[in-house]
Image (spheres, rainbow, N blue to C red):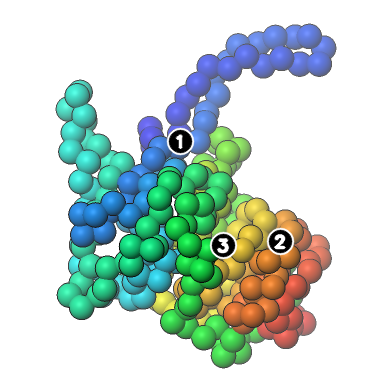
Amino acid sequence: MGRVTQRWRVRQVRASGAVRDRADLLAGEEPLEIRVAGAPFTVTMRTPGHDVDLVAGFLVSEGVVHARDDIARVEYRGGVDADGRRDLNVVDVALAAGVAPPDTSMQRHVYTSSSCGVCGTASIDAVRKVSRYDVATDHATIGVGHLLGLPDRLRARQDVFSRTGGTHAAALFAPAAGGAEPELVCVREDVGRHNAVDKVVGWALLEGLLPARGCALQVSGRASFELVQKAAMAGIPVLSAVSAPSALAAQLGAELGVTVVGFNRGEDLNVYSHPDRVVPG
């Protein structure tokens, strides 16, 4: 866990004037260079951990891969540093035979920060990806009571946030038979909210679960354009956030068939698109 969290000395100053030096725990943040067939594709800032999930999910979000068999191999290729430690900040993806490499117009020409999922996209047209999965045809429903319970269920699994207060989280909930409470199947944390979602989507890809029909994606922050897009690219019909969506996120949800839920804080919520999926119960 040394790279996921790091200790740091801080000076705590109170309004009373009292001063205390103590140790604090910070969420890790390091660059990750993603290569496809040896060619640089992008650099993203992320919390180390579940890097293979992150890379796989990022490639789903970019429309490069759609199924587990589209990826032949994922390897760390950073070599070793001057102290003989393995560099785990460069990952190379080998695509399966017949899978087209990403078009050069999709290449990120600047690094992607931990706060931005679409920064550096070469063309604005490349931002609005086309999903292989028609989410609008997913007629799954979720009871409002179960939906209201998702934020607390996610919060209970945010281990890094509990220790640092510095990470976002995303969780995938799968439908259960007979209208039972949805099953929490994956939780991931990261300093970047889009990275947390990519880690969840990548896990689902590698588990052979895409498209994630009938599933709900719960996120710890707001619902942004790129998160709605990532849900659609993974075939996830419901995106729930504890904060507000942007206008473009709501618009994209309506256009692509994603139910966008905002201000889900356990007592009530707002449904901004495709509200028919949210039913009593």
* 180 or 125: nearer the viewer: 125
**Depth order, front residue of 108/97:** 108
Where is residue 154? Give x, y as percent.
59, 57
Where is residue 222? Give x, y as percent. Answer: 67, 56
Quarter of the image for the N terminus: give it: top left
**What residue is shown at x 50% (from left), y 21% (from top)?**
8
Say above or below: 136 vs 157. below
Is residue 244 depicted above or below 95 in this figure? above
Q: Earlier in the sequence, mark 2 or mark 1?
A: 1
Determine which residue is flagged by label 1. Answer: 28
Instruction: Report the residue at 56% width, 62% height from top.
Output: 226
The quarter holding residue 17 reads: top right
The quadrant in which residue 264 appears is: bottom right
Q: How many marks?
A: 3
Report how far apart the C-alphas of labels 3 and 1 lie in the structure: 23 Å
Which residue: 71% across, 14% down? 13
Residue 246, labelled with which disc?
2
- Badge 2 crowding class, 10 Å Cα cut-off, few under 14, some 14 to 19, many 20 or more, is some
In the rendered structure, find residue 226 and report the number of the disc placed on it. 3
Q: Earlier in the sequence, mark 2 or mark 3?
A: 3
Q: Are marks 2 and 3 in contact (CB under 8 Å)?
A: no
Label 2: which secondary element? loop
